[in-house]
C-alpha cells in the first residue's frame, strides 16, 4: 500500500512538472509570436501591418460594387465625409495611381475603417484594411496587426471580412452569374 501511494505521489509531481513546463512554453511561444507580429512583422512596404485580401475582379468592378454598397447602406459612409471614394495616392511617381483610399464606417461602434485597393493584374484587385479610428471620446487611430492584441485583432479582421469583404465578393459573384461582369481572360 505504501509503495502505491509513493508511486502516485511521484506521478503527480511529474505531471505537475510537465504541466508547468507546457504552460511556460505556451506563454513564451505566444509572447514571441506577439512580439514578431507587432515589432518585427512590419518592415516591408507602405502599409506593413495591413491585412489584405485578393478579390477576383478588376479594380473598376470592385469600385462599382463599393459605390453600390454605400448607396444601399448609407451607414457605411463615414459622417461628415461626402466622398464615397476618398482619393488616389499620387505622392510617389513610380507608384502613382497605385493605392485608392476608401473609408468605411461602423455605425454601431463609431469607428472609421481606413482601407486601400490597388490593381494586382487586370482581373485581380488587392483590398487592404490598414487602420481603424475610434470617433467617440479620444480619437485614437490603431493600426491593424500592430496596435490590437491578438484576440481583438482577430475579431476586428473577422468583423471587417464579414461586413465588407464577403459582401463585395458576394455582389461580384452575383454579377458574374447575371452576366453584368465582364473581365479579361
Image (cartoon, grey):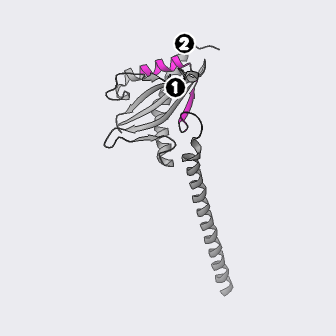
- What's the distance in space between the residues labelled 2 and 1, CA to CA? 24 Å
Q: Residues within 10 Å of mark 2 (few under 14, many from 20)?
A: few
What range is drawn magenta here? Answer: 45-68
Q: Is residue 1 visible?
A: no
* 169, above or below 24, in the image: above
Dot 2 lies on which element? loop
**Residue 180, image x, y percentages:** 52, 12
- Circle 1 is placed at which residue position? 117
Kindly indicate whether the residue at mark 1 contacts the one at mark 2 (C-beta within 8 angstroms): no
Give left or right: position of 170 versus 9.
Answer: left
Residue 137 highlighted magenta (yes or no): no
* 105, above or below 9, in the image: above
Q: Residue at x 49, y 39 (%)?
A: 158
The N terminus is located in which quarter? Answer: bottom right
* Sooner in the amino-acid sequence: mark 2 or mark 1: 1
Q: Residue at x 57, y 23 (%)?
A: 95
Q: Quadrant of residue 6?
A: bottom right
Residue 58 highlighted magenta (yes or no): yes
For residue 154, the mark is none
**Residue 176, image x, y percentages:** 55, 17
Q: Residue at x 49, y 35 (%)?
A: 130
**Residue 28, image x, y percentages:** 59, 58
The C terminus is located in which quarter? Answer: top right
Could you say which is closer to the camera, residue 61 or residue 181? 61
Q: Residue at x 44, y 32 (%)?
A: 114
Dot 1 lies on which element? strand
**Residue 57, image x, y percentages:** 56, 20
Could you say which is closer to the camera, residue 128 or residue 174? 128
- Circle 2 is placed at which residue position? 179
* 46, above or below 11, in the image: above
Amino acid at each position: 500500500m505504501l509503495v502505491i501511494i509513493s508511486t502516485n505521489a511521484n506521478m503527480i509531481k511529474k505531471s505537475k512538472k510537465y504541466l508547468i513546463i507546457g504552460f511556460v512554453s505556451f506563454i513564451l511561444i505566444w509572447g514571441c509570436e506577439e512580439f514578431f507580429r507587432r515589432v518585427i512583422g512590419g518592415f516591408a512596404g507602405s502599409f506593413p501591418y495591413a491585412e489584405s485580401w485578393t478579390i477576383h475582379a478588376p479594380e473598376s468592378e470592385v469600385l462599382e460594387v463599393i459605390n453600390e454598397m454605400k448607396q444601399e447602406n448609407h451607414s457605411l459612409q463615414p459622417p461628415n465625409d461626402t466622398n464615397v471614394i476618398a482619393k488616389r495616392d499620387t505622392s510617389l511617381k513610380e507608384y502613382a495611381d497605385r493605392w485608392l483610399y476608401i473609408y468605411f464606417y461602423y455605425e454601431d461602434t463609431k469607428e472609421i475603417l481606413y482601407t486601400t485597393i490597388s490593381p494586382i493584374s487586370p482581373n485581380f484587385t488587392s483590398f487592404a484594411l490598414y487602420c481603424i479610428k475610434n470617433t467617440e471620446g479620444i480619437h485614437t487611430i490603431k493600426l491593424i496587426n500592430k496596435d490590437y492584441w491578438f484576440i481583438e485583432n482577430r475579431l476586428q479582421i473577422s468583423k471587417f471580412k464579414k461586413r465588407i469583404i464577403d459582401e463585395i465578393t458576394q455582389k461580384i459573384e452575383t454579377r458574374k452569374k447575371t452576366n453584368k461582369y465582364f473581365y479579361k481572360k
